[in-house]
Image (cartoon, coloured by chain):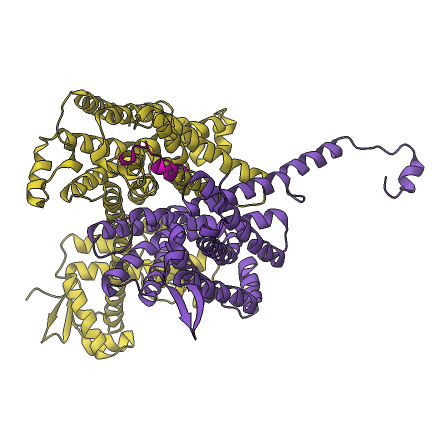
Chain colours: A purple, B yellow
C-alpha cells in the first residue's frame, strides 16, 4: 500500500493537505450562506465566469500578480451577478435560465481567450477544470521578517480563510438575518442589497484563490458539499459552521490518500471523499439519515395501543 | 408542426447518408495550413470530409439540443441540463476504459447511464432531505464530475492509455468527429424529433400543467423520465463537439432566445432548433479558422449572440423594442395633450380665429415658452399642425383638428360616464379621464355614446363634440370648421 506520509513526500503532501483544508474551509464557510439563500448555483456560475476575468487580467498586466488577478476575478464575479439580475429582471427569462446563459457565455469567452493567447496566458485548459493542487509545494515560499511562511498560494489562502472566518464572526447577525428573513433585515436597518453584493464580491475573492488549486468546476463542490454535509448533521448555524471546518480537514486528508492510491488528480479525489462523506451523512445521520428515519418509521408503524383507560390516564414513564 | 418535422427528418436522413460515404482525408486537427483566408475557402467549399463531418455534427447537435432545451427551459429546469452534462463524465471515462479506444457506442452507453443516475440522485436528495434543488444539483454536478476527473486522470497516467481522445470531451473539438459519431448523432436526433412529434401534446401538457395532465391520465412521471432520457442522449452526442462544461449552454441559450420571440410552444421548439443549428455552424466555422481553437466555446458564443440580439430587439419582449414602444407611446400622449390644450384655447374664445400662439399654448399648459415651442414642433412633425409667423402661430391641420376633437370627446364622455353610471362626484373624474382618453377605441366610444343617450354636455357644462360631427368634418367640410390651419 502507498504511504503519502513517508519521509520524502511528507513536506509536499503537508502543503497539499494544508491548501486543500484552507480552500475547503474558506469555500465551505461562504458556501453555507449560499445554501441558505438558495444561491448554490450562483456560486457555480461565479466560479466559472471568473475565468475571463483572470484571462483579461493576465493579458492586461502580463503577469501572474496577486492584485490584477484579484481585481479581474472580482470584476468578473460582480459582472456575472449583474448580468444574471439584468436578464432575469428585464425580460421574461427565469432565473435558472439566466444563470445558465450568463456563466456559459463568460466561460466560453475565457476559454477562447486562453486558446487564442496561449503563449501569454500562463493557464492550462485542464488546470482550469481541475486545478493543480499537486504542485502547490513547488511555489516559492513567502519570507516575512526572516520567517518561512510557506508557499505563496498557501499563505494567500490562509490569509483569505482567516479574513473569511473573522468577517463571519463580525457580521454574523447581518448575514444570518438577511439570509433567513430579508423583511426582518429591512426593519432592523440592514441593507440586504449591500450584504448581497458584499457576499458576491467576497465569494469571487475566495473562488479566485481556490481556482488555481481546484479548478473552475470543483470549486462548486468545495462551496456546497461541506455545508450540505454539516446541515445533514445539525440544524444550528454555529454548529454547521464548526462542522464545515472539520469536514474540510477530513476531505483534504483522505483525499490525499485516495489520490496517492489511485494515482489521480488530488483536487478531484478530495471532492470524491467529500461526496462519500455526504452519502454517509445522507444514510446514517442521527437526525435526518435515511437509515434512522426508516428505523424510526418502522417502530412508529407498530404503535403500542394503551390497554386500559388507566394506562392512558397514568402514562408510565419510559413506556 | 408535424410537416416541418418531417422536412427536418428528411434532411437529417440525407445528412446521415452523406456521412456514411467512405471518404478518407486528413482531419482538421492534422492540417498544417493556418492562414485563415485559405481556411475560409476550404470550409466553404466543403471539399474536406472532415469539414462535412464537423458541420453535420454541429448541425445535428444544434437541432437536438434546441428541441429538447425548449422543454427544460419552460419547465424551469434549465440547470438540470448543466448537472446532467457534468454527471456524464464518469460514464464517458468508464466507457473509454472499456477497451481504451474511442468506441462511440461504449462511451454513449456509459455516459447515458451516468447521466440518468445523476438526475435520479438529484431527485432522491430533494425528496429525502431538507436540501433544496439548487444544492442537490450542485452536489451531483460536482460529485459526479470529480469522480469523472479522477478516472480521466487515472487514464492519462496509464502507460497504455490512449491520451489523445479523452480530453476532447472536456472542451470539445468538432474536428475529432468521425463517420461513426455522425451516424450516432443522426440516429439520436431522429429519435428525439420522432418522440417529440409523436407525443407533442403529452409533453406540452405535462410541461405546463402537470396537474391537468394527471387528470387527463397522461403519465407525467413517465414523460419526465422520457425527457430526461432524451436529454441524456442529446448531451452525450454533443459532448465531443461542445465539451462537458458548455453543453448546458446549447440546451439553454437557443431555447431562451426562442422564448423571447414567441408565445407558442411549437414555434419556440422550431426556432430553438434553428438557433441551435445556426450556433453549431458558427462554432464549426470559427474553430476551423485557427489550429487550436476549440469548437464548443465558439458555438456557445454564437448562441449567446443570438440570445443577445433577441434580448434587445425581439419584436414583443426585446429591451430596446419595449423602450422604443414606451417612448413613442408617451410621445403620442404628449402630442395628444397639446392638441387638447389648443382645442381648449380655441373653445375659450368661442372658436373665433384660427391660429393659436405659442404664448397662449404656454399659458394653457402652464409651462415655459421653450417647452411650448418644442411641443409645437412635435405637432408639426406628426403633421397635426403647421407653424406660421416664424413658428409663433400654430394652425391645426384637418387631421390635427380631428384628433383634438376626438381627445376632448373621449375625455368628456368618460367624465359623464363616471358621474352618471358610476356615481362619481363631478370634481373627482378629471384625473381618471386624463388617463383613459388616450386609449379609448372607436367601438368603446360608440358604446359610451349610446349608453349616455348621445348626451351633448359633460358634467362641467362643456359641450361634447359628437362622433357624428367629427366624422362629417372628415368628409370634407373643411371650410366651415373653425380653427384648423390652412396649407401655406
- Quarter occupied by residue B225: top left
- Is B364 positioned to the left or the right of B424 in the image? left
Looking at the image, can residue B346 be seen? yes
Residue A171 x %, y %? 54, 68
Residue at 63% across, 37% down: A290
Q: Nearer the viewer, residue B282 or B334?
A: B282
Residue A110 x %, y %? 28, 52
Residue B382 x %, y %? 17, 61
Quarter of the image where the N terminus of chain B is located: top left
Give yes or no for residue B152 being in the magenta stretch: yes
- Quarter occupied by residue B202: top left
- Is B253 positioned to the left or the right of B432 in the image? left
Would you say the magenta stretch is mainly helix, strand or loop?
Answer: helix
From this view, report whether residue B344 is shown above or below residue B112: below
Looking at the image, can residue A93 be seen? no
Quarter of the image where the C terminus of chain B is located: bottom left
Residue at 40% across, 53% down: A213
- Is B117 positioned to the left or the right of B402 in the image? right
From this view, report whether residue A69 is shown above or below residue A221: below
Residue B348 x %, y %? 27, 73
From this view, report whether residue A150 is shown above or below residue A255: below
Residue at 21% across, 39% down: B278
Q: Nearer the viewer, residue B274 or B61?
A: B61
Q: Please state the extent of the stretch shown in magenta in the rendering.
A: B151-164
Give yes or no for residue A118 being in the magenta stretch: no
- Is A146 positioned to the left or the right of A114 in the image? right
Amino acid at each position: 500500500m502507498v504511504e503519502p506520509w513517508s519521509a520524502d513526500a511528507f513536506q509536499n503532501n503537508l502543503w497539499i493537505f494544508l491548501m486543500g483544508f484552507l480552500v475547503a474551509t474558506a469555500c465551505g464557510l461562504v458556501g453555507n450562506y449560499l445554501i441558505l439563500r438558495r444561491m448554490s448555483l450562483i456560486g457555480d456560475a461565479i466560479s466559472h465566469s471568473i475565468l475571463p476575468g483572470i484571462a483579461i487580467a493576465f493579458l492586461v498586466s502580463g503577469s501572474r500578480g496577486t492584485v490584477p488577478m484579484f481585481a479581474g476575478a472580482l470584476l468578473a464575479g460582480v459582472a456575472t451577478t449583474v448580468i444574471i439580475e439584468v436578464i432575469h429582471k428585464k425580460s421574461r427569462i427565469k432565473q435558472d435560465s439566466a444563470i445558465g446563459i450568463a456563466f456559459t457565455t463568460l466561460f466560453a469567452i475565457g476559454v477562447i481567450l486562453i486558446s487564442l493567447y496561449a503563449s501569454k496566458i500562463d493557464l492550462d485548459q485542464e488546470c482550469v477544470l481541475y486545478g493543480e493542487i499537486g504542485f502547490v509545494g513547488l511555489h516559492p515560499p513567502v519570507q516575512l521578517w526572516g520567517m518561512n511562511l510557506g508557499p505563496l498560494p498557501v499563505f494567500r489562502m490562509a490569509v483569505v480563510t482567516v479574513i473569511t472566518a473573522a468577517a463571519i464572526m463580525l457580521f454574523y447577525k447581518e448575514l444570518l438575518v438577511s439570509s433567513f428573513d430579508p423583511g426582518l433585515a429591512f426593519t432592523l436597518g440592514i441593507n440586504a442589497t449591500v450584504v448581497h453584493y458584499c457576499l458576491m464580491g467576497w465569494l469571487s475573492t475566495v473562488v479566485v484563490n481556490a481556482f488555481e488549486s481546484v479548478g473552475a468546476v470543483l470549486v462548486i463542490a468545495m462551496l456546497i458539499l461541506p455545508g450540505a454535509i454539516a446541515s445533514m448533521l445539525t440544524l444550528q448555524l454555529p454548529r454547521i459552521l464548526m462542522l464545515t471546518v472539520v469536514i474540510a480537514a477530513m476531505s483534504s486528508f483522505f483525499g490525499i490518500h485516495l489520490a496517492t492510491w489511485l494515482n489521480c488528480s488530488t483536487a478531484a479525489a478530495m471532492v470524491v471523499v467529500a461526496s462519500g462523506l455526504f452519502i454517509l451523512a445522507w444514510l446514517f445521520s442521527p437526525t435526518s439519515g435515511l437509515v434512522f428515519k426508516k428505523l424510526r418509521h418502522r417502530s412508529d408503524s407498530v404503535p403500542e395501543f394503551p390497554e386500559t383507560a388507566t394506562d392512558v390516564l397514568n402514562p408510565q414513564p419510559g413506556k | 408542426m408535424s410537416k416541418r418535422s418531417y422536412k427536418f427528418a428528411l434532411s437529417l436522413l440525407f445528412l446521415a447518408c452523406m456521412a456514411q460515404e467512405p471518404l478518407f482525408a486528413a482531419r482538421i486537427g492534422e492540417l498544417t495550413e493556418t492562414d485563415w483566408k485559405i481556411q475560409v475557402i476550404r470550409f466553404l467549399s466543403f471539399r474536406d470530409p472532415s469539414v462535412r463531418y464537423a458541420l453535420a455534427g454541429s448541425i445535428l447537435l444544434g437541432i437536438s439540443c434546441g428541441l429538447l432545451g425548449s422543454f427544460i427551459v419552460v419547465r424551469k429546469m434549465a440547470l438540470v441540463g448543466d448537472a446532467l452534462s457534468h454527471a456524464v463524465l464518469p460514464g464517458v471515462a468508464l466507457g473509454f476504459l472499456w477497451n481504451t479506444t474511442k468506441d462511440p457506442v461504449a462511451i454513449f452507453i456509459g455516459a447515458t447511464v451516468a447521466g440518468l443516475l445523476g438526475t435520479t440522485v438529484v431527485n432522491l436528495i430533494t425528496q429525502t432531505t431538507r436540501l433544496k434543488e439548487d444544492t442537490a444539483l450542485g452536489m451531483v454536478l460536482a460529485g459526479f464530475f470529480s469522480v469523472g476527473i479522477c478516472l480521466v486522470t487515472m487514464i492519462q497516467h496509464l502507460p497504455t492509455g490512449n491520451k489523445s481522445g479523452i480530453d476532447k470531451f472536456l472542451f470539445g473539438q468538432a474536428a475529432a468527429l468521425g463517420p461513426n459519431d455522425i451516424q450516432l448523432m443522426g440516429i439520436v436526433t431522429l429519435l428525439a424529433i420522432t418522440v417529440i412529434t409523436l407525443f407533442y401534446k403529452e409533453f406540452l401538457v405535462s410541461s405546463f400543467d402537470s396537474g391537468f395532465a394527471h387528470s387527463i391520465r397522461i403519465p407525467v412521471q413517465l414523460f419526465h423520465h422520457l425527457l430526461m432520457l432524451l436529454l441524456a442522449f442529446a448531451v452525450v452526442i454533443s459532448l465531443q463537439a461542445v465539451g462537458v462544461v458548455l453543453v448546458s449552454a446549447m440546451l439553454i441559450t437557443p431555447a431562451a432566445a426562442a422564448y423571447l420571440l414567441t408565445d407558442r410552444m411549437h414555434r419556440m421548439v422550431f426556432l430553438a432548433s434553428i438557433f441551435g443549428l445556426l450556433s453549431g455552424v458558427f462554432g464549426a466555422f470559427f474553430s476551423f479558422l485557427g489550429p487550436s481553437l476549440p469548437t464548443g466555446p465558439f458555438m456557445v458564443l454564437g448562441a449567446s449572440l443570438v440570445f443577445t440580439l433577441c434580448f434587445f430587439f425581439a419584436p414583443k419582449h426585446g429591451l430596446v423594442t419595449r423602450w422604443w414602444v414606451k417612448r413613442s407611446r408617451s410621445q403620442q400622449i404628449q402630442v395628444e395633450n397639446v392638441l387638447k390644450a389648443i382645442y381648449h384655447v380655441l373653445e375659450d374664445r368661442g372658436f373665433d380665429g384660427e391660429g393659436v400662439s405659442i404664448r397662449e399654448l404656454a399659458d394653457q399648459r402652464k409651462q415655459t415658452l421653450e417647452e411650448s415651442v418644442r411641443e409645437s414642433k412635435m405637432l408639426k412633425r406628426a403633421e397635426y399642425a403647421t407653424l406660421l409667423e416664424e413658428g409663433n402661430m400654430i394652425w391645426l391641420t384637418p387631421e390635427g383638428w380631428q384628433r383634438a376633437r376626438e381627445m376632448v370627446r373621449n375625455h368628456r364622455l368618460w367624465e359623464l360616464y363616471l358621474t352618471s353610471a358610476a356615481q362619481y362626484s363631478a370634481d373627482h373624474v378629471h384625473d381618471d379621464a386624463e388617463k383613459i382618453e388616450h386609449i379609448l377605441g372607436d367601438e368603446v366610444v360608440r358604446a359610451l355614446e349610446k349608453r349616455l343617450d348621445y348626451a351633448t354636455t359633460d358634467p362641467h357644462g362643456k359641450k361634447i363634440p359628437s362622433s357624428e360631427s367629427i366624422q362629417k368634418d372628415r368628409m370634407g367640410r373643411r371650410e366651415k370648421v373653425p380653427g384648423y390651419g390652412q396649407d401655406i
